[in-house]
Image: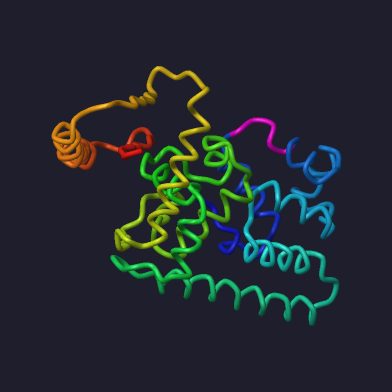
Amino acid sequence: MISVFDFQNYREFLNSWIDGQNQKGLKGKLANAAGVSSTLISLILKGDKQLSLEQASDIADFIGLNDKENEYFFLLVDYGKAGTIPLREKLLKRIKEQQQLSKNTSRRIKKDRELTEEEKAVYYSSWIYTGVRNLSATGEFNDVQSISQRLNISPSMAAKALNFLLEHGLCKQENGKILYGPTYIHVDPDSPFVIKHLQNWHLRGFQYMDQYNESNLFYSCPMSLSKEAAAQIRMLLPKFIEEVLKIMRPAASEEVYCFNLDWFKY
C-alpha cells in the first residue's frame, strides 16, 4: 500500500497511487471527484497546473485518506504552491517532521498484547475493523479502494479502519502490501466489548439473510425437547466449534466468512 508520508511531492504521490491501483479510467474518476476536467487533472499531474485546497480535499476524500494523511497531503499541496524560497524551506521542514513522526509511530507498535480500553472501544465499535483485518489475510486486497469495494464501504471508512489496524499492529505493511498483523488480541470473555463484537456480526449476518448465496447457510429450529436432550446438545456445541477451529487455523487464507452460532433458552 502506498503511503502519502513516503512523498514530499503531492504529484508524485498521486501518480504513484494511480499506477498502484491497476485500474482503467482513474484519472477521469479523479477529475470527477475534484470537479475539474480530465484535461486539467492531466496538467496538474504533469506539473503544469496546481491543485487548489478545495480540489485537494475532494481528491483526498476520493482516495480515502484519514485525518492525519489529509493534513499531510494539504501540506504537500501548500509546499507545491509556495512561491518563495523561505516559505518552501519552512514547509519542507514541517514535511520532514511529519514524515519522521509517522515513522516513529510505526515503531511503537507492540506485538502480542491486550488492547487498551480506548483501543477496544474503537476496534469493537464496528464489524468493519475485524472485517478489514481478516480480508488482509487473503493477500488480494492491498489498498483502500479494493477493500472498500469488496466490503461495500466508503473509501474514507476503509482508510480509517486500515490506519487504525496498521498503527496498532493488527495489520502490517510489507513491500507495499497490506498483510495480517502479528499482534494477538486478548479480550476477557466477560468483557462488554465481546458482547458488542457478537452483536456487530450477528447484525451483519441479518443483512445477508435475504440475499441468496449457495455458499451461505442460515438455520433456525425452535424446538421442544427434554432437559436431558437440551443438555446433550449444549455439550455438543463447544466440541463442534473446536472442530471448526481445527479446520480453519491451518488452512490458507483465501476467502472471508463469518461463523455465527445461536443457542439459547426462550
Q: Nearer the viewer, residue 78 or 101?
A: 101
Residue 3 quadrant: bottom right
Q: Is residue 212 visible?
A: yes
Q: Is residue 26 magenta?
A: yes
For the stretch drawn in magenta, the main secondary structure is loop
Q: Position of residue 87 (x, y in %)?
A: 79, 79
Q: Residue at x 40, y 55 (%)?
A: 171
Q: Is residue 134 magenta?
A: no
In this picture, residue 79 sits left or right of residue 97: right
45 shown above or below 228: below
Q: Position of residue 169 (x, y in %)?
A: 39, 62
230 shown above or below 20: above
Q: Nearer the viewer, residue 114 or 176?
A: 114
In this picture, residue 44 sits left or right of residue 196: right
Residue range in magenta is 23-27
In this picture, residue 75 sits left or right of residue 252: right
Q: Residue at x 69, y 58 (%)?
A: 10
Q: Nearer the viewer, residue 265 or 205?
A: 265
In this picture, residue 155 sits left or right of residue 61: left
Q: Position of residue 67 (x, y in %)?
A: 65, 63
Q: Nearer the viewer, residue 250 or 18?
A: 250
164 shown above or below 155: below
Q: Position of residue 117 (x, y in %)?
A: 43, 70
Q: Quadrant of the C terminus?
A: top left
Q: Residue at x 37, y 24 (%)?
A: 217
Marker count (numbered): 0
Q: Is residue 250 visible?
A: no
What scheme was used to colour the molecule?
A: rainbow
Q: Residue at x 72, y 76 (%)?
A: 91
Residue 11 quadrant: bottom right
